[in-house]
Image: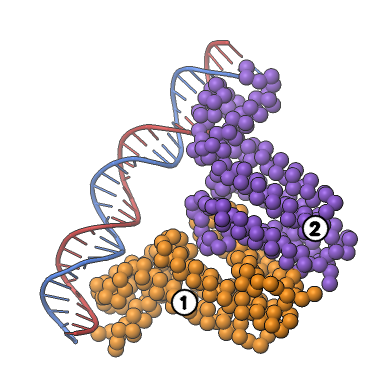
Chain colours: A orange, B purple, C blue, D red
DNA sequence: TTTTGACCCGTAAACTAAAAAAGTCAAAAA
DNA sequence: TTTTTGACTTTTTTAGTTTACGGGTCAAAA
């Protein structure tokens, strides 16, 4: 046996999968390769994960968890709202950089109800965090907004949207983020955040 | 001869092409079909347009012209900046509705240098118009911005981006704009505009 | 100068076969 | 009983081939 218990083995598999995914991309990684890396049989993997997509999702969940933890920690710090927003942008930037080789977009593109559900829950969690920040600002008298949830959603969508704007229409292949364009997006996100915050401040 | 002169014939072709494009989509329309509609030979079309893409571009230009004229007229009216922005959003909405069956996205997706050039010039023209509006606001003391061009670009990108946000990742097929989602986008654009304008107002 | 029928040619769709990868299971091992 | 595995089946990808269609050309006609 490779691990002491079931959970540990699951974790070892996720680790090995993530390593492969980051090196070769998720779609180019086979179950056999992961099994070989772990010096176990492919059938073993299926003992722990019902199918390949379940493995994908588990890996996604795993990295998503640390991703959110970082952001939410930021939202709890005792700094200005604008700093929070700015730092969150930076965290996301680093996340995208770190996991760019993972080909997340390919996993996310499958349109299966399952994945759509995950995406929706991610959005929800992001919005919830942003709402909290805005509500805090409202409570402290810094912001003047009627519907914090709607504003949080708007801010979230605007930030996400800036990633696509400019590359007019459809990036049906890899949104090749050359350093240059990528930095421009981050700069725009920060500038928009500045204006946005000013726009919802109590006059 | 179908027309009195060359320009008129070009126009007849554009008209027929646009009709087909709007009915069946640009990519599903063949040169033969357009020729048949005009009761002329395919070869004639090639006398007026060097190739199919040139025809696409010409159609694009034709409808783009009226599109811009409408917007620029709006920008010259004697109304508040916010009204201008809002009205421009409405004009665009109507444009998208009117020409949705045209499958513009498919034409725009070819990544050819020629099309990229057109897209860039469209962006430039939009940005120029928005810059003008912002500069007017700066001159009248309504706005306080250092770099009107950068702000115009940001606003433009943010508006465009909102169209893609939410449909996380890649719409490799038709961005099926069901009425509902479409209206939500417009609402978000108007709300963001409101906040944005407030965010660049002189305090 | 403009139009056309006949023709050429590149390519995308349609099939196909072979290979590879996903996924299963009964039996062995722990 | 829980976990692992080799041997197996099924599904998906890929690569190769054919075909038909639509883009594009041209010499001759109008």
At mark 2, the secondary structure is helix
Residue at the disc numbered 1: A63
Q: Residue furthest right?
A: B140
Q: Residue at x 58, y 33 (%)?
A: B19
Give whichever of B95, B117 is nearer the camera.
Answer: B95
- Is residue A180 visible to us here? no
User: What is the C-alpha distance between the residues marked 1 and 2?
Assistant: 44 Å
**Quadrant for the C terminus of chain B in the image:** bottom right
Residue B191: image x %, image y %?
Answer: 69, 63
Nearest-to-viewer mark from 1 and 2: 2
Whether A201 is drawn above or below B103: the answer is below
Marked residue chain, label 1: A
| Label 2: how many Cα within 10 Å (few below 14, some 14–19, many 20+) | some
Residue A63: image x %, image y %?
Answer: 46, 77
Q: Residue at x 65, y 59 (%)?
A: B187
Whether A26 is drawn above or below B174: the answer is below
Q: Residue at x 51, y 72 (%)?
A: A122
Q: Residue at x 75, y 73 (%)?
A: A198
- Is residue B9 visible to us here? yes
Give whichever of B193, A183 is nearer the camera.
Answer: B193
**Residue B101, located in which quarter of the rendered image?**
top right
At mark 1, the secondary structure is helix
Position of C27 with respect to A36 (left or right) is: left
Position of B148 with respect to A77 (left or right) is: right
Residue A177: image x %, image y %?
Answer: 57, 63
**Quadrant for the N terminus of chain B in the image:** top right
Circle number at residue B81: 2
Circle number at residue A135: none
| Label 1: how many Cα within 10 Å (few below 14, some 14–19, many 20+) | few
**Residue A86, located in which quarter of the rendered image?**
bottom right
Marked residue chain, label 2: B
Position of B72 with respect to B116 (left or right) is: right
């Amino acid at each position: 046996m490779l691990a002491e218990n079931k959970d540990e083995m699951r974790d070892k598999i996720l680790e090995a999968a993530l390593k492969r995914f980051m090196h070769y991309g998720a779609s180019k990684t086979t179950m056999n390769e992961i099994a070989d890396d772990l010096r176990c049989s492919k059938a073993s993997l299926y003992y722990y994960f019902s199918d390949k997509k379940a493995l994908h999702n588990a890996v996604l969940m795993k990295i998503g968890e640390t991703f959110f933890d970082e952001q939410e920690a930021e939202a709890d710090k005792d700094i200005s709202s604008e700093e929070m927003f700015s730092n969150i942008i930076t965290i996301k930037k680093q996340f995208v950089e770190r996991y760019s080789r993972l080909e997340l977009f390919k996993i996310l593109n499958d349109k299966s109800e399952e994945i759509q559900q995950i995406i929706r829950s991610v959005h929800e969690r992001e919005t919830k965090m942003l709402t909290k920040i805005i509500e805090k600002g409202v409570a402290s008298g810094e912001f003047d907004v009627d519907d914090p949830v709607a504003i949080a959603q708007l801010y979230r969508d605007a930030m996400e949207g800036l990633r696509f704007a400019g590359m007019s229409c459809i990036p049906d292949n890899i949104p090749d983020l050359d350093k240059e364009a990528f930095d421009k997006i981050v700069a725009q996100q920060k500038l928009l955040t500045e204006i946005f915050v000013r726009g919802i401040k109590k006059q």
